[in-house]
Image: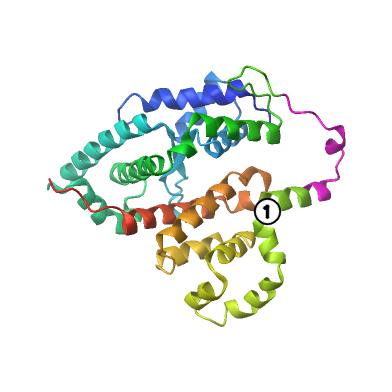
């Protein structure tokens, strides 16, 4: 990976400028943005992918799924990017809510409130994949969620938090970074690290990446868990071992599709459990480019993230205001 602070900042500002336009193209899509940054910033597709993940990890931007991958129809996954700025997100939310109402009314010849449209469309959202209605519905839902997320935990999107995360990322990824005090942080180049055997490097990366996930699998409790998991109903397993242990083990075993099915089947419904799962998925996403197995499961990870976000929205959203 060959990234600099300037490239990260330039990519952030490219996204920010689009977000401020307030048009149907205000949320840049991964396919078009990739072509744009290759031309304007000279950034390779691989470096752009890594840069997006780093900016997400630092809470500078959000990444959302706009179009789901459909190999049967030759449809590639498309993501959309939004800067983690409450005012920009709020303006975009209002704009896309209005746009959703217009598209829905034009297509179905009836007028509904935004929450009514979402409630009607969401259960059959897959049938609208890669359509204007489906894309705008996804954008509207995620903008509403991101606004609530920033309102709920503003400290996680503050300048201090972002700078702390950027310093951590710069140190980890060996990117020279200049914080607000103007003193550049230049990570030391360790010649020994470059001589580390590939097998040892993979073990080190895996252990540091998974952290608590690895400890959960290595614990004595895991053997008992493994023996009972397929014998008992899932709710009994959760009662015995707790949601935190269950999520860690499932993540360490790369069982992202299994977790998605549990969420969609409403086996995991408590708000605190869904939020724990959501934060864990975010940690996994930040390490996708460090683990080839995570890279191979990338689509399943994003599908899990989408299922959790939708479950949180539909299960725990406040009642709509009377108009």
The image position of residue 44, as x and y in percent, is: 61, 29
**Is residue 192 within the magenta segment?**
yes
Quadrant of the rendering where the C terminus is positioned: top left
- The residue that disc 1 covers is 211
Q: On the rendered structure, is 75 left or right of 95?
A: right
The image position of residue 261, as x and y in percent, is: 46, 65
Determine whether 286 is above or below 170 in the image: below
Quadrant of the rendering where the N terminus is positioned: top right
Q: On the rendered structure, is 243 left or right of 47?
A: left
* Residue visible at 60% across and 80% down in the picture: 228
Quarter of the image for residue 172 reads top right
Q: Residues within 10 Å of mark 1 (few under 14, many from 20)?
A: few
Determine whether 49 is above or below 208 in the image: above
**In front here: 106 or 227?**
227
State whether residue 111 appears in this view.
yes
Q: On the rendered structure, is 230 left or right of 198?
A: left
State whether residue 42 appears in this view.
no
**In front here: 54 or 117?**
54
* Residue visible at 68% across and 20% down in the picture: 184
The image position of residue 13, as x and y in percent, is: 47, 23
Quarter of the image for residue 166 reads top right
- First to last magenta residue range: 186-201
Q: SS for tag 1?
A: loop
Determine whether 216 is above or below 221 in the image: above
* Residue furthest bottom as drawn: 231
The image position of residue 16, as x and y in percent, is: 43, 25
**Is residue 26 within the magenta segment?**
no
């Amino acid at each position: 990976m060959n990234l600099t602070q300037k490239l990260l900042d330039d990519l952030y500002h490219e996204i920010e400028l689009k977000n401020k336009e307030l048009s149907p193209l205000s949320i840049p899509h991964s396919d078009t943005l990739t072509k744009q940054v290759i031309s304007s910033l000279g950034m390779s597709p691989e470096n752009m992918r890594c840069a997006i993940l780093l900016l997400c990890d630092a809470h500078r931007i959000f990444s959302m799924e706009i179009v789901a991958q459909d190999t049967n129809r030759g449809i590639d996954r498309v993501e959309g990017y939004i800067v983690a700025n409450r005012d920009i997100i709020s303006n975009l939310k209002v704009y896309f809510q209005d746009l959703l109402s217009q598209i829905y009314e034009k297509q179905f010849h009836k007028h509904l409130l935004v929450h009514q449209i979402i409630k009607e469309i969401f259960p059959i959202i897959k049938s609208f994949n890669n359509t204007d209605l489906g894309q705008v519905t996804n954008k509207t839902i995620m903008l509403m969620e991101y606004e609530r997320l920033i309102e709920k935990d503003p400290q996680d999107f503050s300048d201090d938090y972002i700078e702390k995360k950027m310093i951590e990322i710069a140190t980890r990824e060996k990117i020279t970074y200049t914080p607000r005090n103007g003193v550049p942080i230049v990570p030391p180049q360790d010649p020994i690290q470059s001589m580390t055997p590939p097998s040892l490097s993979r073990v080190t990366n895996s252990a540091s990446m998974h952290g608590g996930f690895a400890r959960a699998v290595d614990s004595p409790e895991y053997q008992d868990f493994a023996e009972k998991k397929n014998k008992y109903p899932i709710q009994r397993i959760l009662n015995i071992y707790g949601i935190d242990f269950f999520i860690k083990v499932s993540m360490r075993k790369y069982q992202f599709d299994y977790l998605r099915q549990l969420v969609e089947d409403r086996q995991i419904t408590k708000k605190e459990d869904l939020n724990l799962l959501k934060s864990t998925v975010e940690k996994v996403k930040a390490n996708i480019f460090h683990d080839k197995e995570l890279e191979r499961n990338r689509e399943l990870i994003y599908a899990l993230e989408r299922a959790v976000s939708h479950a949180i929205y539909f299960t725990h959203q406040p009642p709509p205001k009377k108009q």
